[in-house]
Amino acid sequence: MDVTAGIVRLGEPAVALLRGTAQTCEPAAIGDAEFMELLDLPEDPADLPASLTELPPAVLKRWIGFALRRQRTSSAPLGRKLVQEDIAELLGCGREKVAHLESGRNMLNKLEVQALFSLYKCPQLVDSFLELVKLAKKRRPVSPVVNGDPTRYTSYAGLEEGATGVETASLLVPHGLSQTAGTAEAIMRTGEEEYTEDEIQERLEQRLERQSVLHRKSNPLKLWMVIPQAVLEDLPGPPEVQREQLQHFVELAKLPHVDIQVLAKGTGVHRASHGPFTIMTFPIPGDSGLVYVETLIKGLFFEEADEIMRYKRIMDHLRARAKSQEQSTRLMKQLWKELQ
């Protein structure tokens, strides 16, 4: 069946509605009770719930993409479940663009929203959905020092801000959420890029601001970090900076939502020999999260379920090989004393 039967394609002068378009709709039959489905949106944008409108833009983009994917796979407006090629034909684009829309990387424009909501027989929800798109497109303030690649910083920082959990294999340096100002500065001064003093100061402020997610009064981010003993014994900076960082680890580990495990020497080759990675989870039921890997050139996001599962298995492997949190804290205290 032709998905565009009865529709004027977006490349033509107008977007026509599917034949028989209704003015009311029923909530999607499939989905978690806690998840607001696409068709559950209120008709009036003013009635949009704060649980959506107050999400960080990067996380709201994920909700939009996830909601679009759930609606496509759980409804059958043509008598069968839709595939991405159906949506691509409707919107007059390639399947790759639909994949980007459903991952939150790209946002729909007004004509595309009208066509899609016509397909789902809910044109009265267009305004509310467009309001969410508008909110999702809001840019996080970007410092001049990262203007060379603003999306690299804003995308990651925005996702981190809205995440409920971060699991990280910090195999080379401490994760940014756990760094002291001294450690962060030492890393900046020894990296490939050269920064002015003002740029270093501004980056330090950004780094410390990111760490506020660990100290939110409501729903602080849950951090689980595995770090090799070799990294702890060769931290960036002079001895006083290293001591401060070790003490900071010990204090962080006291927080009920922070776990720090040390991968001791002598544990042999592990499955994360490919390098550091970070797994993020989000407050979106059914969303499997993402994996972030930073390279010298750019940061990479992996969002396919099988990719995420592979990294989760590696993270579980590292946790099982590492010392317990209690043992790790004792080791960090010992290393701190050795630096006295």
Image (cartoon, helix red, strand yellow):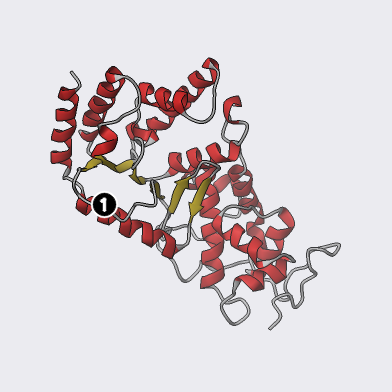
Residue sticking out furthest to the right: 13
Q: Nearer the viewer, residue 84 or 130?
A: 84
Residue drawn at the location 59% of the way across and 48% of the way down = 132
Location of residue 118 (image quadrant): bottom right
Q: Position of residue 255 (x, y in %)?
A: 23, 34
Above or below: residue 76 compared with residue 152: below
Residue drawn at the location 61% of the way across and 70% of the way down = 84
Looking at the figure, which quarter contains the C terminus?
A: top left
Location of residue 2 (image quadrant): bottom right
Q: Nearer the viewer, residue 277 or 308?
A: 277
Above or below: residue 127 compared with residue 122: above
| Residue placed under numbered mark 1 in the picture | 318
Query: Is residue 52 something that shows in the picture?
Result: yes
Q: Position of residue 240 (x, y in %)?
A: 28, 17
Could you say whether the residue bearing mark 1 is in a helix, strand or loop?
helix
Q: Residues within 10 Å of mark 1 (few under 14, many from 20)?
A: many
| Amino acid type indicated by mark 1 | Leu
